[in-house]
Protein backbone atom coordinates (compact mmCIF):
# COMPACT_ATOMS: atom_id res chain seq x y z
CA UNK A 1 0.00 0.00 0.00
CA UNK A 2 1.60 3.22 -1.16
CA UNK A 3 2.78 5.48 1.65
CA UNK A 4 1.94 2.97 4.37
CA UNK A 5 4.13 0.78 6.53
CA UNK A 6 1.26 -0.90 8.36
CA UNK A 7 -1.36 -2.30 5.98
CA UNK A 8 0.25 -5.74 5.78
CA UNK A 9 0.42 -5.82 9.59
CA UNK A 10 -3.32 -5.20 9.78
CA UNK A 11 -3.96 -8.05 7.35
CA UNK A 12 -2.04 -10.44 9.62
CA UNK A 13 -4.65 -10.00 12.37
CA UNK A 14 -7.82 -10.33 10.27
CA UNK A 15 -9.81 -13.55 9.78
CA UNK A 16 -8.55 -15.53 6.78
CA UNK A 17 -11.59 -14.93 4.55
CA UNK A 18 -11.51 -11.16 5.04
CA UNK A 19 -7.75 -10.99 4.67
CA UNK A 20 -7.83 -12.95 1.42
CA UNK A 21 -10.52 -10.72 -0.09
CA UNK A 22 -8.79 -7.49 0.89
CA UNK A 23 -5.44 -8.65 -0.44
CA UNK A 24 -7.10 -9.49 -3.78
CA UNK A 25 -8.20 -5.87 -4.21
CA UNK A 26 -5.87 -3.81 -6.45
CA UNK A 27 -3.52 -1.73 -4.34
CA UNK A 28 -4.45 1.53 -6.03
CA UNK A 29 -8.00 1.12 -4.66
CA UNK A 30 -6.64 0.67 -1.14
CA UNK A 31 -4.37 3.68 -1.44
CA UNK A 32 -5.27 6.38 1.05
CA UNK A 33 -7.31 4.18 3.40
CA UNK A 34 -7.09 5.57 6.93
CA UNK A 35 -9.05 2.93 8.83
CA UNK A 36 -10.18 -0.67 8.44
CA UNK A 37 -13.35 -1.23 10.47
CA UNK A 38 -15.19 -4.43 11.40
CA UNK A 39 -18.60 -4.52 13.10
CA UNK A 40 -20.29 -7.73 14.31
CA UNK A 41 -23.49 -8.31 12.35
CA UNK A 42 -22.52 -5.44 10.10
CA UNK A 43 -20.00 -4.52 7.41
CA UNK A 44 -16.28 -4.55 6.90
CA UNK A 45 -15.41 -1.13 5.55
CA UNK A 46 -12.50 1.14 4.70
CA UNK A 47 -12.53 4.79 5.72
CA UNK A 48 -10.80 7.38 3.52
CA UNK A 49 -10.54 11.12 4.04
CA UNK A 50 -13.49 11.75 1.73
CA UNK A 51 -15.33 8.44 1.31
CA UNK A 52 -16.17 5.01 2.72
CA UNK A 53 -15.96 1.72 0.83
CA UNK A 54 -17.67 -1.51 1.90
CA UNK A 55 -16.23 -4.97 1.32
CA UNK A 56 -18.53 -7.05 -0.91
CA UNK A 57 -19.35 -10.70 -0.25
CA UNK A 58 -18.02 -11.63 -3.67
CA UNK A 59 -14.86 -9.52 -3.24
CA UNK A 60 -14.18 -5.96 -4.30
CA UNK A 61 -15.40 -2.70 -2.81
CA UNK A 62 -18.70 -0.85 -3.05
CA UNK A 63 -19.48 2.77 -2.19
CA UNK A 64 -22.95 1.89 -0.85
CA UNK A 65 -23.94 -0.46 1.96
CA UNK A 66 -26.48 -2.99 0.76
CA UNK A 67 -27.29 -6.73 0.85
CA UNK A 68 -24.19 -7.48 -1.22
CA UNK A 69 -21.90 -6.25 1.56
CA UNK A 70 -19.82 -8.76 3.51
CA UNK A 71 -21.46 -9.22 6.91
CA UNK A 72 -19.00 -10.11 9.63
CA UNK A 73 -19.91 -12.64 12.30
CA UNK A 74 -19.44 -12.11 16.04
CA UNK A 75 -17.16 -15.16 16.02
CA UNK A 76 -14.87 -13.40 13.51
CA UNK A 77 -14.63 -10.36 15.79
CA UNK A 78 -13.76 -12.66 18.67
CA UNK A 79 -11.17 -14.47 16.54
CA UNK A 80 -9.54 -11.15 15.67
CA UNK A 81 -9.38 -10.09 19.33
CA UNK A 82 -7.78 -13.45 20.16
CA UNK A 83 -5.18 -12.80 17.47
CA UNK A 84 -4.51 -9.37 18.99
CA UNK A 85 -4.05 -11.08 22.37
CA UNK A 86 -1.88 -13.80 20.81
CA UNK A 87 -4.54 -16.29 21.92
CA UNK A 88 -4.27 -15.35 25.58
CA UNK A 89 -7.14 -12.97 26.26
CA UNK A 90 -6.63 -13.16 30.04
CA UNK A 91 -3.11 -11.74 29.67
CA UNK A 92 -4.42 -8.59 27.95
CA UNK A 93 -6.32 -7.08 30.86
CA UNK A 94 -4.69 -3.67 30.48
CA UNK A 95 -5.55 -3.38 26.79
CA UNK A 96 -9.09 -4.63 27.38
CA UNK A 97 -9.63 -2.07 30.14
CA UNK A 98 -8.33 0.78 27.95
CA UNK A 99 -10.23 -0.32 24.85
CA UNK A 100 -7.29 -0.38 22.44
CA UNK A 101 -4.23 -2.31 21.37
CA UNK A 102 -0.97 -1.09 19.86
CA UNK A 103 0.58 -3.62 17.51
CA UNK A 104 3.53 -3.72 15.14
CA UNK A 105 4.29 -0.89 12.69
CA UNK A 106 2.49 1.66 14.87
CA UNK A 107 -1.02 0.34 14.22
CA UNK A 108 -3.63 1.19 16.87
CA UNK A 109 -6.71 -0.98 17.18
CA UNK A 110 -9.78 0.42 18.95
CA UNK A 111 -12.19 -2.10 20.45
CA UNK A 112 -15.81 -1.54 21.47
CA UNK A 113 -18.25 -3.79 23.29
CA UNK A 114 -19.58 -4.60 26.74
CA UNK A 115 -17.48 -3.91 29.81
CA UNK A 116 -17.49 -6.12 32.89
CA UNK A 117 -18.89 -4.91 36.21
CA UNK A 118 -15.69 -5.76 38.10
CA UNK A 119 -13.01 -3.20 38.83
CA UNK A 120 -11.22 -2.16 36.77
CA UNK A 121 -13.84 -2.72 34.06
CA UNK A 122 -12.66 -4.80 31.11
CA UNK A 123 -14.16 -5.59 27.75
CA UNK A 124 -15.65 -9.08 27.85
CA UNK A 125 -17.87 -8.95 24.76
CA UNK A 126 -16.63 -7.47 21.52
CA UNK A 127 -18.79 -5.72 18.95
CA UNK A 128 -16.45 -3.78 16.67
CA UNK A 129 -12.82 -3.13 15.82
CA UNK A 130 -11.11 -0.15 14.25
CA UNK A 131 -7.64 -0.66 12.78
CA UNK A 132 -6.07 2.74 12.18
CA UNK A 133 -3.54 2.73 9.38
CA UNK A 134 -0.38 4.31 10.74
CA UNK A 135 1.27 6.89 8.53
CA UNK A 136 4.56 8.62 9.23
CA UNK A 137 4.82 11.35 6.64
CA UNK A 138 8.40 12.43 7.05
CA UNK A 139 8.93 15.98 5.88
CA UNK A 140 5.32 17.12 6.27
CA UNK A 141 6.36 19.47 9.10
CA UNK A 142 9.51 20.84 7.48
CA UNK A 143 8.04 24.27 6.78
CA UNK A 144 6.44 24.66 10.20
CA UNK A 145 9.61 23.49 11.91
CA UNK A 146 11.83 25.91 9.98
CA UNK A 147 9.71 28.93 10.88
CA UNK A 148 8.89 27.95 14.47
CA UNK A 149 12.21 26.81 15.85
CA UNK A 150 12.53 27.63 19.54
CA UNK A 151 8.89 28.74 19.82
CA UNK A 152 5.93 27.55 21.85
CA UNK A 153 3.36 26.48 19.27
CA UNK A 154 -0.08 24.89 19.08
CA UNK A 155 -1.20 22.84 16.06
CA UNK A 156 -4.97 22.88 15.61
CA UNK A 157 -7.56 21.40 13.29
CA UNK A 158 -10.71 19.34 13.05
CA UNK A 159 -11.14 15.57 12.94
CA UNK A 160 -8.72 13.82 10.54
CA UNK A 161 -6.98 17.09 9.65
CA UNK A 162 -3.54 15.58 10.24
CA UNK A 163 -2.72 17.05 13.67
CA UNK A 164 -1.15 13.88 15.05
CA UNK A 165 0.80 13.20 11.85
CA UNK A 166 2.13 16.77 11.87
CA UNK A 167 2.99 16.57 15.57
CA UNK A 168 4.82 13.27 15.08
CA UNK A 169 7.01 14.80 12.39
CA UNK A 170 7.66 17.89 14.51
CA UNK A 171 8.73 15.56 17.30
CA UNK A 172 11.05 13.68 14.93
CA UNK A 173 12.65 16.87 13.64
CA UNK A 174 13.04 18.44 17.08
CA UNK A 175 14.13 15.22 18.74
CA UNK A 176 16.96 14.66 16.29
CA UNK A 177 19.00 17.51 17.75
CA UNK A 178 17.41 18.72 21.01
CA UNK A 179 16.58 16.91 24.24
CA UNK A 180 12.89 16.21 23.77
CA UNK A 181 10.22 14.43 25.80
CA UNK A 182 7.09 13.11 24.12
CA UNK A 183 4.07 12.80 26.43
CA UNK A 184 2.20 10.09 24.56
CA UNK A 185 -0.81 9.56 26.81
CA UNK A 186 -2.60 7.00 24.63
CA UNK A 187 0.46 5.76 22.76
CA UNK A 188 -0.78 7.26 19.48
CA UNK A 189 2.37 9.09 18.39
CA UNK A 190 5.31 6.83 19.19
CA UNK A 191 3.24 3.59 19.23
CA UNK A 192 5.52 1.87 21.72
CA UNK A 193 5.63 -1.90 21.28
CA UNK A 194 7.81 -3.93 23.64
CA UNK A 195 9.29 -0.65 24.81
CA UNK A 196 10.44 0.44 21.35
CA UNK A 197 8.79 3.30 19.41
CA UNK A 198 7.37 1.90 16.18
CA UNK A 199 7.42 5.40 14.71
CA UNK A 200 10.46 7.64 14.36
CA UNK A 201 10.07 10.33 17.02
CA UNK A 202 13.71 11.50 17.08
CA UNK A 203 17.00 10.07 18.29
CA UNK A 204 17.07 12.26 21.43
CA UNK A 205 13.39 11.85 22.34
CA UNK A 206 12.33 10.19 25.59
CA UNK A 207 8.78 8.83 25.60
CA UNK A 208 6.37 8.87 28.54
CA UNK A 209 3.27 6.83 27.74
CA UNK A 210 0.08 5.59 29.40
CA UNK A 211 -0.15 8.36 31.97
CA UNK A 212 -1.99 11.68 31.99
CA UNK A 213 -0.47 14.61 30.12
CA UNK A 214 -0.28 16.70 33.29
CA UNK A 215 1.50 13.99 35.28
CA UNK A 216 3.79 13.22 32.34
CA UNK A 217 4.78 16.87 31.96
CA UNK A 218 5.51 17.24 35.68
CA UNK A 219 7.58 14.03 35.68
CA UNK A 220 9.50 15.06 32.55
CA UNK A 221 10.43 18.49 33.92
CA UNK A 222 11.57 17.00 37.23
CA UNK A 223 13.57 14.04 35.95
CA UNK A 224 14.50 14.27 32.26
CA UNK A 225 15.75 17.88 31.84
CA UNK A 226 14.02 18.40 28.46
CA UNK A 227 14.55 21.37 26.22
CA UNK A 228 11.25 20.64 24.44
CA UNK A 229 8.10 18.76 25.46
CA UNK A 230 5.67 17.48 22.82
CA UNK A 231 2.12 16.43 23.66
CA UNK A 232 -1.14 15.77 21.85
CA UNK A 233 -4.73 17.00 22.38
CA UNK A 234 -4.74 19.46 25.28
CA UNK A 235 -8.05 18.75 26.99
CA UNK A 236 -8.12 20.00 30.59
CA UNK A 237 -7.07 22.81 32.89
CA UNK A 238 -4.60 20.48 34.58
CA UNK A 239 -2.92 20.00 31.18
CA UNK A 240 -2.69 23.75 30.65
CA UNK A 241 -1.44 24.48 34.16
CA UNK A 242 1.31 21.87 33.78
CA UNK A 243 2.32 23.43 30.45
CA UNK A 244 2.50 26.93 31.93
CA UNK A 245 4.60 25.63 34.83
CA UNK A 246 6.87 23.81 32.37
CA UNK A 247 7.38 26.96 30.30
CA UNK A 248 8.25 28.75 33.54
CA UNK A 249 11.05 26.20 33.97
CA UNK A 250 12.50 27.11 30.57
CA UNK A 251 10.96 24.29 28.51
CA UNK A 252 9.50 24.90 25.05
CA UNK A 253 6.22 23.19 24.12
CA UNK A 254 4.75 21.82 20.90
CA UNK A 255 1.13 20.79 21.47
CA UNK A 256 -2.07 20.11 19.57
CA UNK A 257 -5.69 20.98 20.26
CA UNK A 258 -8.96 20.18 18.55
CA UNK A 259 -10.44 23.23 16.85
CA UNK A 260 -10.84 24.59 13.34
CA UNK A 261 -10.73 28.31 14.19
CA UNK A 262 -9.54 30.67 16.88
CA UNK A 263 -13.15 31.44 17.76
CA UNK A 264 -13.81 27.75 18.32
CA UNK A 265 -10.70 27.35 20.45
CA UNK A 266 -11.56 30.39 22.54
CA UNK A 267 -14.72 28.69 23.81
CA UNK A 268 -12.56 26.22 25.74
CA UNK A 269 -11.20 27.60 28.99
CA UNK A 270 -8.10 25.39 29.01
CA UNK A 271 -7.07 26.68 25.57
CA UNK A 272 -7.99 30.27 26.38
CA UNK A 273 -5.76 30.01 29.45
CA UNK A 274 -2.82 29.14 27.21
CA UNK A 275 -3.49 31.69 24.48
CA UNK A 276 -3.99 34.52 26.98
CA UNK A 277 -0.88 33.61 28.97
CA UNK A 278 1.37 35.51 26.56
CA UNK A 279 3.68 32.50 26.50
CA UNK A 280 2.62 30.84 23.24
CA UNK A 281 3.96 32.26 20.01
CA UNK A 282 1.88 30.81 17.19
CA UNK A 283 -1.18 28.70 16.46
CA UNK A 284 -0.99 26.68 13.24
CA UNK A 285 -4.41 25.82 11.81
CA UNK A 286 -4.75 22.89 9.40
CA UNK A 287 -7.19 22.92 6.50
CA UNK A 288 -9.16 19.78 7.28
CA UNK A 289 -9.78 16.15 6.38
CA UNK A 290 -9.96 16.76 2.62
CA UNK A 291 -6.29 17.83 2.61
CA UNK A 292 -4.79 16.48 5.86
CA UNK A 293 -1.58 18.08 7.04
CA UNK A 294 -1.97 21.24 4.96
CA UNK A 295 -1.71 24.60 6.75
CA UNK A 296 -4.54 27.07 6.30
CA UNK A 297 -3.42 29.84 8.66
CA UNK A 298 -0.71 30.77 11.14
CA UNK A 299 -2.13 32.98 13.89
CA UNK A 300 0.52 34.95 15.73
CA UNK A 301 -0.21 35.52 19.39
CA UNK A 302 0.92 38.24 21.74
CA UNK A 303 4.63 37.62 21.60
CA UNK A 304 4.80 36.01 18.16
CA UNK A 305 7.32 37.40 15.70
Image (cartoon, grey):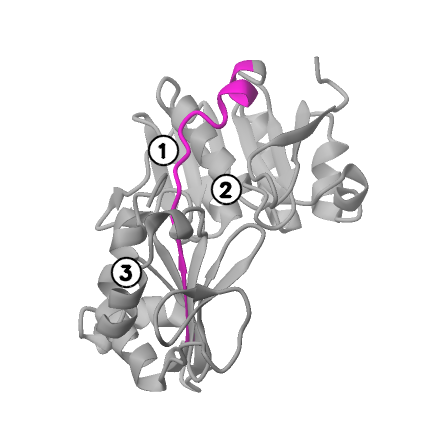
Question: Residue beneath label 2, please?
Answer: 164
Q: Residue 137 in magenta?
A: yes
Pointers 1 and 2 in contact (C-beta within 8 Å): no
In the image shown, does 17 or 88 lie closer to the viewer? 17
In the image shown, does 279 or 39 lie closer to the viewer? 39
Query: Which quadrant would the C terminus be assigned to in this image?
Result: top right
* Residue at image point 38% right, 80% down: 72
User: Which is nearer the N-term, disc 1 or disc 2?
Assistant: 2
The answer to whether residue 103 is above or below residue 165 is below
Pointers 3 and 1 in contact (C-beta within 8 Å): no
Q: Is residue 289 visible?
A: yes
In the image shown, does 104 or 216 lie closer to the viewer? 104
Helix, strand or loop for disc 2: helix
Helix, strand or loop for disc 3: loop
Q: Is residue 74 left or right of residue 260?
A: left
User: Which is nearer the N-term, disc 3 or disc 2?
Assistant: 3
Q: What is the x, y in percent for residue 285?
A: 67, 34
Distance from disc 3 to disc 1, alpha carbons, whole Å, reads: 33 Å
Q: Looking at the rendered structure, which numbered label has been put on residue 201?
A: 1
* Residue at image point 81% right, 41% down: 263
Q: Residue 101 in magenta?
A: no
Q: What is the x, y in percent for residue 125?
A: 38, 84
The answer to whether residue 104 is above or below residue 248 is below
Q: Is residue 240 visible?
A: no
Distance from disc 3 to disc 2, alpha carbons, whole Å, reads: 31 Å
* Residue at image point 38% right, 25% down: 175
Q: Nearer the viewer, mark 3 or mark 2?
A: 3
Pointers 3 and 2 in contact (C-beta within 8 Å): no
Q: Looking at the rendered structure, which numbered label has been put on residue 242?
A: none
Q: What is the x, y in percent for residue 228?
A: 47, 26
Question: Residue beneath label 3, please?
Answer: 24
Q: Which residues are magenta?
A: 128-146
Amino acid sequence: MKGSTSFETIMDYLPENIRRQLLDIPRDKLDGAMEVRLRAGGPVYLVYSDKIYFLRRDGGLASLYNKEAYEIKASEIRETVERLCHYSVHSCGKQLSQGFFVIEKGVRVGVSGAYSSVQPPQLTEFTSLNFRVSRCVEGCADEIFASNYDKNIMICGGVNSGKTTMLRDMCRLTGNFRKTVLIDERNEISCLHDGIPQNDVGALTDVISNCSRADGIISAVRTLSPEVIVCDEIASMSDSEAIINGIGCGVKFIVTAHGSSFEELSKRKEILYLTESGLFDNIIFLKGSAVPGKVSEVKRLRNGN
